[in-house]
Amino acid sequence: MGNTEPKMPPAYVVTSADHALRAAVMLQLEGGLTVSQVAERLGVARSTAHRLLQTLVYRDFAVQDQQRVYYPGPVLELATHSQSRTSRLRAAALPHLQRLVDLVGESANLTIRTGDTARFIASVECRQALRVGSREGMVFPAHRTTAGLVLLAELGPAEVDELYDEARYTERPDERPDLPSLRARLAKVRRTGFALNNGLSERGVVAVGVAVRDAEGMSHAGLSVSMPSVRYDRNQLPTLVATLHRSADAIEAGRGGD
């Protein structure tokens, strides 16, 4: 079941299913949404968004209140009370992600780490025809994502060894990273203050990321920008990293009680 290959989209994406899954993820992460909001986020007509949401209601992924606002349904019960730390972080970060996209012209993501996996909790796509699509709700091995590397770099050597202990991967040995290579990569992230991911998650995609810190100064999320490799210019890397740090600072300033 293990697979160390970069994640690639299927050859034939069922668009309606993809839209429905993305709508479900939005509800899970954000709580209440209207038909117009879902339509705008997915880039579809209001009638299409309405049909998608009604299907989610029918299958108990969503419920609709008297004001015609949709909320997570019983299937997404864990997200019904959406004032979780992750939900608040996401809500605070979204405007800054949009401004970051406007500044750099590439797609932006906010990611958290759980154990050895990284989950994209917010994505804003750029408007270029050739772009990296939304990763919202997707889960990748942490060591294969930009933000995952940023967050893993916060761990001490013993913590990294424990996280990737061979005994934990007896049933999925192919998913365990090469520890010497990983340690070297994490050391570079700590030294430079950013992570550069060239094709680790997906072929033909380059991403750059920095840490977003909580009130205690600990990294609790990673902010990244992703682009097709054909548009990556290494000479612009210092400027891009500086822009990412400014955006991360802005997110931290608006984190409230987190």
Image (tube, helix red, strand yellow):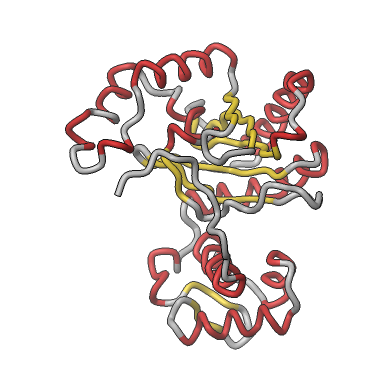
Residue 175, by quadrant, is: top left
**128 left or right, relative to 214:** right
Give the answer, above or below, for where 109 lies relative to 194: below
Q: What residue is drawn where x is 59% and y is 14%? A: 192
**170 left or right, relative to 125:** left
Q: Residue furthest top?
A: 191
Residue 99, by quadrant, is: top right
Q: How many marks?
A: 0
Residue 114, by quadrant, is: top left
Estimate the x, y position of residue 88 in percent, counting from the top left.
55, 51
Q: Nearer the viewer, residue 89 or 233?
A: 233
Q: Nearer the viewer, residue 208 or 2?
A: 2
Give the answer, above or below, for where 218 lies relative to 96: above
Estimate the x, y position of residue 201 in percent, counting from the top left.
52, 39
**104 left or right, relative to 195:** right
Give the answer, above or below, for where 39 lies relative to 114: below
Estimate the x, y position of residue 67 in percent, counting from the top left.
64, 84
Q: What residue is drawn where x is 37% and y is 43%? A: 3
Q: What residue is drawn where x is 56% and y is 85%? A: 54
**248 left or right, relative to 58:** right
Estimate the x, y position of residue 64 in percent, counting from the top left.
55, 83
Q: What residue is drawn where x is 47% and y is 87%? A: 58
Q: Nearer the viewer, residue 159 or 254?
A: 159
